Image (tube, grey):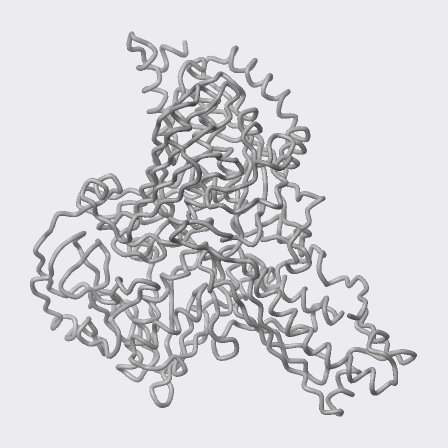
Amino acid sequence: MARQGKLKTGIRQPLAHDSAAKHVSGEALYTDDFPEPPGLLHAAFGMSERAHARITSIDLSPVRKAPGVVAVMAAVDVPGDNNCAPVMHDDPIFADRLVEYVGQSIFAVAAESVEQARRAARLAVIEYEDLPPILTAEAAMAAKSFVLPSHTMKRGEPKKAIAKAKHRLKGRIKIGGQDQFYLEGHIAMAVPGEDRDVTVFSSTQNPSEVQHLVAEALGLSSNAVTLEIRRMGGAFGGKETQPALFACIAALLADKTGRPVKARVDRDDDMVMTGKRHDFVIDYDVGFDDKGRIKGVEFMQAVRCGMSADLSGAIADRAMFHADNAYYLPAARIVSHRCKTNTVSNTAFRGFGGPQGMVGIEQVIDEIARELGTDPLDVRRANLYGGPSGRGGRDVTPYHMTVEDNIAPKLLDDLEASSDYRTRRKEIDAFNASSPVLKRGIALTPVKFGISFTTSHLNQAGALIHVYTDGSVHLNHGGTEMGQGLFVKVAQIVAEEFQIDLDRIKITATNTGKVPNTSATAASSGTDMNGMAARNAARAIKDRLIAFAAEAFDCKKADVVFQNNKVRAGKKALSFTGLVKAAYLGRVSLSATGFYRTPKIHYDRKKAAGRPFYYFAYGAAVSEAVIDTLTGEYRFPRVDILHDVGQSLNPAIDIGQIEGGFLQGLGWLTMEELYWNADGSFATHAPSTYKIPAASDWPEAFDVRIFDRGRNQEPTIHRSKAVGEPPLMLAISGFLAIKDALAAACGHQISPPLDTPATPEAVLMTLEAMRAKIGGARHTLREAAE
């Protein structure tokens, strides 16, 4: 292949996001910003007021008679399949006879204005026969209520290993959910065409899935529906399956009326109607030796899925896959229960179950350390894959995959030294001994996160590239841009391949009419797969150009070199544009598709064994927390992160992903609290009741570094590694730092019974519980502090 020189706008360069200037200036167009076509109607939704009930009667005539109303649709009016579920066909577009969560869609109305549509939707007269709701995973377990069969993963004989171990601990941790809280809410606009064709503009991570579900709802073939998305204002997994409901309703109303329809929900309805990160209850039973080395462990993971399966099967599986994090478990049994509740169906969220599984094992490691009176970092090192030095012999996961790329020990060595962890630990102990009210804590945790879709057939991607005679390039692929920088990275890859400047490449909207049958932009695999597909397309064109140049200028193919917007063919030198023009005149095709399928992926679900991941991404973080024992409030004075991205395609984008992922993870574990009332209504459905991290929650000192020796041992795109999801789990160190500070507040006599999210209220209640347990006499926190 032709040699390449260094291009200033190619790979490895810290370039700005392609839409950065448009983001801050307000010029970036989102689905709601597109010029509204003539005759546009606006949709609104009639939602269930009950968590679990039979619909005994429904009268929509007041809705139809309301001012401005053009059409009303319910289940009986759907011409095709009344379903918007991605996998199990268990989530109707419109509830029919039975409602299973507050906020479930029962009907939709199209009117001349947003206000008219929303006012009309409130006029429906619906009568219910209430049924007992199941609202929590614990209640679902008791009732044996599941959306999918339970699943077990096992390696070795954990019960025997636990029984023989010198030490044994049992415990439980509850892990809260999280709302994606994207800046741009759910929205879809459907524009009807000839022959019942429809073009749908949707804020979605998964264009092809939405396309297919819209076609099925309309009773049409997929070729009648075109889905387009240029960018999203955030998604975080919440726009992988959930956009289908809004797109289907917009398309159904557009098909019925023959007019364009926009379906846009406000923030409150968005939060009520859409799924969150799954909350978990994890029980553990672990046996270990005097050094804290785990001999055997059993986990029970109860997952609240909501009323339907959505993606809960794969999410619960990934939680099982990450129940080891970076630690070798010689004997392990992991049981996962997928609980059906009368709450909105939970869905994908950055990390896709992996974070919850990791919290479980990190809780176990932390509890072992406190039981032994040992620094938790030493227990972590004792249990790392490969042992403390990283040597082999301890490298097989509970799902029987060999860990071949373990760099966790190197990361811990580097970060422990650069963060001065040991010295700071001593300083923190000294501070706590002399500070009656403020208490500090510190934690260093690793991350090992598997990269690939665990559903094997999703590991494929396509791309389409056109080169025009003026030397400009049109780039399209199946990935979607949600702010993460995927489009600029793929464009850099193509620029590197052609050795042309980035501004010669036109980044275009994702469109199912250009690249079909795409996988969701998820599982941190967007750049891995779409970047490789785009490079393959570019190489197909480049190979044609090389063959043409070699023949036209009488040289060997090896002597055709692309470099810095120019091409040398033997003794002939010309511009890239010059070669393209000559090739066009020579009747050479300047358009190509590219395809990529991730190799090595296989998994036998019946045996719970195989290789579900192509490789692992690694990272480590040290977080320091200080809590006020009088109020439960806390802050993070310092965070140090070292993260492995292989050979970075764009260090600026990657650093941003690491920083943002960590802070989002910190929000999940410390402040973002979801709350349902006893009747199943969702209480935290707005910024007034649901707190996400703000600029003021940024660590006071925040040192983020990319591991400079990183290199993917697998032949990924330019030996890079995924960076979307793995950094989120670094925030587990923040949660454990709070827990460490809590332990210090009681002289490290007991381990704090802290669940997530560790809100100030939860911290204060934990302090009270700890003092009550060890104090005997009842003192207020203020009296104890004094």
Q: Position of residue 547 (x, y in %)?
A: 77, 82
Is 563 placed left or right of 464 in the picture? right
Quarter of the image containing the N terminus? Answer: bottom right
Q: Residue at position x 48%, y 19% from top?
A: 439
Q: Is residue 322 above or below residue 628?
A: below
Q: Position of residue 691 (x, y in %)?
A: 39, 42
Quarter of the image containing the C terminus? Answer: top left
Q: Position of residue 297 (x, y in %)?
A: 41, 32
Q: Of residues 126 and 455, which is closer to you in this image?
A: 455
Q: Of residues 777 and 388, which is closer to you in this image?
A: 388
Q: Of residues 18 and 571, which is closer to you in this image?
A: 571
Q: Residue at position x 69%, y 54% from top?
A: 14
Q: Residue at position x 30%, y 84% from top?
A: 258
Give the quadrant of residue 776.
Answer: top left
Is 630 placed left or right of 55 in the picture? right
Give the quadrant of residue 242.
Answer: bottom left
Q: Residue furthest top?
A: 777
Q: Position of residue 651 (x, y in %)?
A: 67, 51
Is 742 placed left or right of 121 in the picture? right
Q: Of residues 137 and 453, which is closer to you in this image?
A: 453
How many numbered marks have been drawn onto this rendered protein structure?
0
Q: Is residue 385 above or below residue 317?
A: above
Give the quadrant of residue 507.
Answer: bottom right
Is 135 placed left or right of 23 in the picture? left
